[in-house]
Image (cartoon, coloured by chain):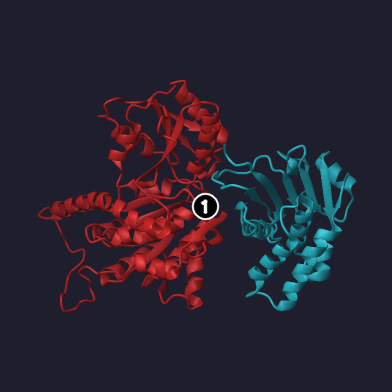
Chain colours: A red, B cyan
Amino acid sequence: MAAKNVMAITGAEAAAYAMKQIEPDVVAAYPITPQTPIVEYFAKYVADGEVRTEMIPVESEHSAMSAVVGAAAAGARAMTATSSQGLALMSEIVYIASSLRLPIVMGLVNRALSAPINIHCDHSDAMMVRDSGWIQLFCEDAQEVYDLTILAVRLAEHEDVRLPVLVNQDGFIISHGVEPVEVLPDDVVKKFVGELKPVYPLLDTDHPVTYGPLDLYDYYFEHKRQQIEAMKHAYRVFPQIAEEFYEISGRKYNFVEPYRLEDAEYVMVALGSTNGTIKDVVDEMRSEGKKVGLLKIWMFRPFPKPEIQRYLTARKAVVVLDRAASFGAEAPLYEAVKSALYEAAARPVMGSFVYGLGGRDLKPEHVRYAFERAIALDLVADKEEYLGLRD
Amino acid sequence: MPAKYFEIRWHSRAGQGGKSAAQLVAETVLEEGKHAQAFPEYGAERSGAPMRAFNRISEGRIRVHHSVESPDVVVVIDDTLLSPTIVSGLKEDGVLIVNTKHSFDFVRKKTNFNGKVCIVNATDIALQEIKRGVPNTVMIGTLARVTGLMNLEMVGKKIREMFERKLPEEMIQANIRALRRGYEEVQCSG
């Protein structure tokens, strides 16, 4: 094995570096705020001649996603990146990308949505497109951003899946934080992602096809059913690709990461960078003899219901941390976890904590507080509570 | 048990290089085989606005992703930012490092901080060596001396790598001279 190549880079640069090694045919991006440094780094690779990607600077995020959709339908490997308001503006075409079954990979730097104006981290943007038919992966740190961006290409393009993938990273906390990232050699990444095998490409003029025509009550429903089934295939295919990635990197991915769960009685569930902070608190509380553990969610869509059931059934208490609110309903991750446990043989006591909106810091003492509440079984399943919020 | 973290908080004005300084420290420390994070705190993005950046350094892997609350070191790149809030959370046995041409008394009076204070006239050094009032490389030299966190040669190597493709050779050498003077010319209270 060659010497490990560790770089000190931000999550944004980790995503861009993975994109450089993937070397997609087309990247389209709107180059100013709320765009992220991901495309800034990538544009530099293009300008320096390090990749042969066709970089299309467009006039809006709506056009960025439109250009990427066009490129993918033509048979190209196409990628982009965005954040918060940018995703909001693209959202019309975000739905179209998944409905057309186009294997686009997009880096999403998770940031709050307006109003009021805020540039910092929360998961409102990802949750806004929760039901748009994209596969969603969440990263704990910059290393995972690099790894999952590469892995996402294979998942998106798998012949049984053919769906777009969002690779989420926490805005500023990961996107602008410098951390060590172990990168693979270019040729290893290129071999892993391989060549895109286009399916019904528009440029195959000998076999003309139409994308997105009128489709009323006669067949629209059947086409939606196919999309539903494709998501199930993603659930089946992901572990195979993760295993292949493990072989080249030594790093194991799955739907979820169980942390000190073997004998844990009180389990926390969360998405994104907060998981690292929770792990430290778990270690601390374990050293005090408290049986706490963590279930980190890597794949949020398709939602890994069997894993949730397997890891959480019969625990004494489960607390779910959400970095987004769902106004008038339960927070998105909590709702999904709670619903997955509806038929569990032994249901844990459950509690929902919303935290970190608009970049509010989640400190170890907040995590500890939520665990203490779980240990005291002082949780009410139908009550939403908040961490780090003024009363 | 979680790793023990050594934490640094940088205070500067946007454009003075606080963010780059934190990044360079992280890169150097990583090269020396330790673990490090560097992250800036973004507010209103305009030149001259007060900004903060952070380092978290450890022998082991760093997993936490929250802000630095009780730093071991506070580095102030612009002494017009000095106030009691600048040392908030600074550990009692922590160090306050300030770029100033004023005295220890001036720093103490502005901050009410009674712990260890180190001062260096980094802006003048930067003006003399780099011909620009960007004192961040000087402050990294000072930080290396005060904390013993980094080998000065390694920092020099990292500066060279960072600027090799952006700056002419004489500017790289000027930055390395500034770094060295920051290391040599710092004065610390007892």
Quadrant into which the C terminus of chain A falls: top right
In this orientation, does residue A389 appear?
Answer: no
Secondary structure beneath label 1: loop
Residue A106 x/y as whole percent: 38, 60
Q: Nearer the viewer, residue A251 or B156?
A: A251
Relative horizontal placement of residue A198, taking residue A351 as reference (left or right): left
Q: Residue at x 47, y 75 (%)?
A: A46
Which residue is situated farthest in the front direction here? A1
Q: Residue at x 30, y 43 (%)?
A: A304
Q: Residue at x 68, y 55 (%)?
A: B49
Q: Nearer the viewer, residue A24 or A361?
A: A24
Relative horizontal placement of residue A125, taking residue B159 as reference (left or right): left
Residue A242 x/y as whole percent: 34, 54
Residue B71 x/y as whole percent: 69, 43
Relative horizontal placement of residue B80, taking residue A266 as reference (left or right): right
Q: Which residue is mark 1?
A: A174
Numbered disc 1: what chain?
A
Residue B171 position by quadrant: bottom right
Q: Is residue B115 above or below residue A94?
A: above
Residue A87 position by quadrant: bottom left
Q: Residue at x 55, y 30 (%)?
A: A287
In this orientation, does residue A244 appear?
Answer: yes
Q: Is residue A320 above or below residue B129?
A: above
Residue B37 x/y as whole percent: 60, 52
Q: Is residue A325 above or below residue A149?
A: above
